[in-house]
Image: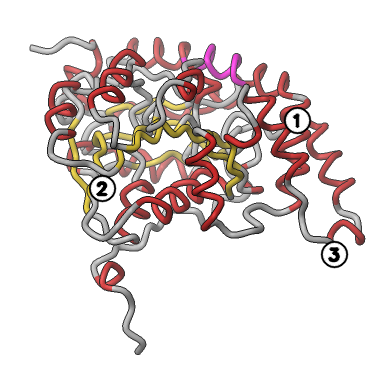
């Protein structure tokens, strides 16, 4: 066998449970559950042209239009094959073996994955009992020398947000540390750090078309940062980072962004309905600003997940994380989908033992003892 890089010898492969999801109500990956805008489908059909398919992609026009949509200069935007690829590009650009990544925990594992592929090591600061970012421990950790900080805002899997004032404090406290703010769920929260790119040269923001815009299959995203950092990333990036279909879909999506924004508004309303319903059932949950809710069903949560799957309803089981034993993450879908989910959960109520779950009393009320 050929000898891999040393970082690969201790690397655990990231294996999201992607298979066997067709034909089911997919409330497990925080996707758009009703599909992209019809205009996007029409644009993709037009792009399925023999001449276009045999031609390498062109990027400058797309970069200009997307930059205008996000309110930045084209030189500040780096096209990526989704957020996962954005993290790969960031790590390939900045991470040396032994460099430190700082993340709040629990969070999206892809930051750690690509950082450790590059030979770095990861430090964690755990959220407090209310899943708020503990600012003082973060600032203390930053003093030890951190190459970059990965912040999902809203966070996955909790749905909680980092207060922008806390982000500003960290940016100013560690000007030589890169702060990567993953705004995959921006459309459901409305909070963005993009306006701060003009002032903070150590800030990087990522966006995706996989969530509110309903284009997860196309793998389309982007990095937004200052012009110098963006150029450095492009210098070592694949010269063809996204394909022509992804570009066509993304451009149609922003042209018809109203469809995604209306979907996001519906999801915010359904999120509040589901939150109130969980409260009535005394099911502890983490108040969310994303398109999902992390809820604590107790030690039988894996069985609840299996029985929902038997009814063709997929949810995400987080029992593999010791701090989230008893938790399922429920993607919030359209009204009719949420009625089906609530109906099936009511039928499984006898399996629910939330009072035995880990620290559930804190997360249901937002209060600490």
The answer to which of marks 2 and 3 sits earlier in the sequence is 3
Question: Which residue in the protein does label 3 denote?
Answer: 54
Asked whether the viewer can see residue 269, the reply is yes
Position of residue 30 measured from the top left corner of the image (x, y, whole percent):
50, 35
Query: Which quarter of the rendering shows the C terminus?
Result: top left
Residue ID at (50%, 33%): 226
Judging from the image, what secondary structure is the residue with disc 3 in? Answer: loop
Does the magenta-highlighted stretch encompass residue 153? no
Image mark for residue 352:
none
Indicate whether 285 appears above or below 269. Answer: below
Residue occupying image coordinates x 85% and y 64% = 54
Q: Residues within 10 Å of mark 2 (few under 14, many from 20)?
A: few
Q: CA distance from mark 2 to mark 3?
A: 44 Å
- What residue is disc 1 on? 37
Q: Is residue 194 above or below residue 79?
A: above
Between discs 1 and 3, the one toward the N terminus: 1
SS type, badge 2: loop
Q: Point out which mark residue 320 bears.
A: 2
- Residue 70 lies in quadrant: top right
Q: Position of residue 271 (x, y in %)?
A: 48, 17
Q: Image quadrant for the N terminus?
A: bottom left
In front of the other: 167 or 323: 167
Query: Which sits in the foreground, 67 or 263?
Result: 67
Q: Which residues are magenta?
A: 264-271
Q: Tell me if I can see residue 326 in this picture.
A: no
């Amino acid at each position: 066998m050929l000898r891999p890089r040393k970082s690969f010898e201790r690397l655990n492969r990231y294996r999201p449970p992607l298979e066997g999801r067709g034909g089911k109500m997919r409330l497990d990956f925080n996707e758009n559950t009703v599909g992209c805008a019809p205009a996007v489908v029409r644009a993709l059909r037009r792009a399925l042209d023999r001449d276009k398919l045999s031609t390498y992609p062109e990027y400058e026009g797309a970069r200009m239009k997307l930059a205008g949509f996000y309110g930045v200069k084209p030189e500040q935007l780096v096209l990526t094959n989704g957020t996962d690829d954005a993290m790969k590009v960031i790590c390939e650009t900045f991470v040396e073996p032994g460099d430190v990544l700082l993340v709040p925990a629990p969070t999206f594992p892809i930051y750690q994955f690509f950082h450790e592929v590059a030979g770095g090591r990861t430090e964690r600061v755990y959220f407090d009992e209310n899943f708020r970012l503990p600012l003082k421990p973060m600032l203390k950790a930053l003093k030890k020398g951190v190459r970059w900080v990965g912040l999902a805002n809203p966070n996955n899997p909790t749905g909680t947000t980092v207060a922008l004032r806390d982000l500003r404090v960290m940016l100013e406290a560690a000007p030589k540390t890169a702060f990567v703010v993953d705004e995959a769920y921006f459309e459901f929260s409305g909070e963005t750090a993009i306006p701060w790119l003009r002032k903070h040269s150590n800030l990087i923001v990522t966006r995706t078309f996989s969530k509110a815009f309903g284009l997860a299959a196309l793998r389309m995203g982007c990095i937004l940062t200052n012009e110098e950092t963006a150029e450095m990333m492009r210098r070592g990036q694949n010269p063809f980072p996204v394909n022509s279909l992804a570009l066509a879909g993304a451009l149609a999506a922003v042209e018809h962004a109203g469809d995604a924004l209306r979907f996001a508004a519906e999801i915010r309303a359904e999120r509040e309905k589901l939150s109130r319903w969980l409260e009535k059932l005394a099911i502890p949950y983490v108040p969310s600003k994303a398109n999902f809710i992390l809820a604590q069903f107790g030690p039988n949560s894996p069985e609840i997940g299996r029985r929902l799957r038997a009814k063709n309803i997929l949810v995400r089981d987080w029992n593999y994380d010791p701090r989230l034993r008893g938790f399922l993450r429920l993607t919030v879908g359209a009204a009719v989908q949420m009625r089906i989910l609530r109906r099936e959960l009511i039928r499984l109520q006898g399996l629910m033992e939330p009072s035995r779950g880990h620290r559930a009393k804190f997360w249901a009320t937002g209060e600490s003892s």
